[in-house]
Image (tube, rainbow, N blue to C red):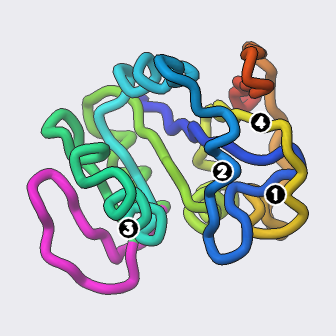
Amino acid sequence: MRKLSVFIAMSLDGYIAQPNDDLSFLKLVEKEGEDYGYAEFTDTIDTLIIGRKTYDHVLNEIGSSHYDNGQRDVYVITRTQRPNSGRTIFYTGNLAELVQRLRSENGKGIYCDGGSEIINELLKNDLVDEFIISVIAILVGDGKRLFKDGRPEQQLELLNTKTFDTGLTQLHYRRKR
């Protein structure tokens, strides 16, 4: 069965964005030639699930090729019907049903790149197998939390911890079964 992974960055106090979806604190750890294992990780996946707000932000900041590179299927979870574009599918159905269907198909891993609404919906349905969380050494104080209240308890097993000279610490967990 294909596993679903979350690979995401957050502040030390648990925020993935500051108010008004401000992601500028991520620039604190930008370093030429350092991707914190992102390329290695994305080599293990062929399907991406992403929330529409996160997708639109990346589209505006980086461009569509960041996600839709012709090598993977991209499911943008949205409430508004939009025409598909290349291998990018704008999905308005049930998220849990989508993940269960994708898991039953052949392929590499499935990657959820946010946002927090999508991640927490996956957690409520006990669908996340692995977390790779990059913690940035800043307390932002307010914004969008990675983990919201109202989800079931889930025990995790620490697989690896990496530290980087930028102050970033990366935690790699898998769900205990």
Q: Looking at the picture, which amino acid does disc 4 mark? A: Val
- Report the front residue among 96 and 142: 142
Q: Nearer the viewer, mark 2 or mark 3?
A: 3
Label ID, residue 135: 4
Which of disc 1 and disc 3 is earlier in sequence? 3
Gap in angstroms between the C-alphas marked 2 and 4 = 23 Å
Q: Looking at the picture, which amino acid does disc 1 mark? A: Pro
Gap in angstroms between the C-alphas marked 2 and 3 = 26 Å
Look at 27% across and 53% down and name the residue there: 63
Q: Which percent across, then down, holds residue 133?
A: 69, 35
Label ID, residue 18: none
Residue at the disc numbered 2 = 126
Q: Residues within 10 Å of mark 2 (few under 14, many from 20)?
A: some
Residue at the disc numbered 1 = 152
Look at 42% across and 29% down and name the residue there: 1
Label ID, residue 56: 3
Which of disc 4 and disc 3 is earlier in sequence? 3
Q: Which percent across, then down, holds residue 34?
A: 53, 19
Look at 27% across and 29% down and name the residue there: 107
Q: Residues within 10 Å of mark 1 (few under 14, many from 20)?
A: few
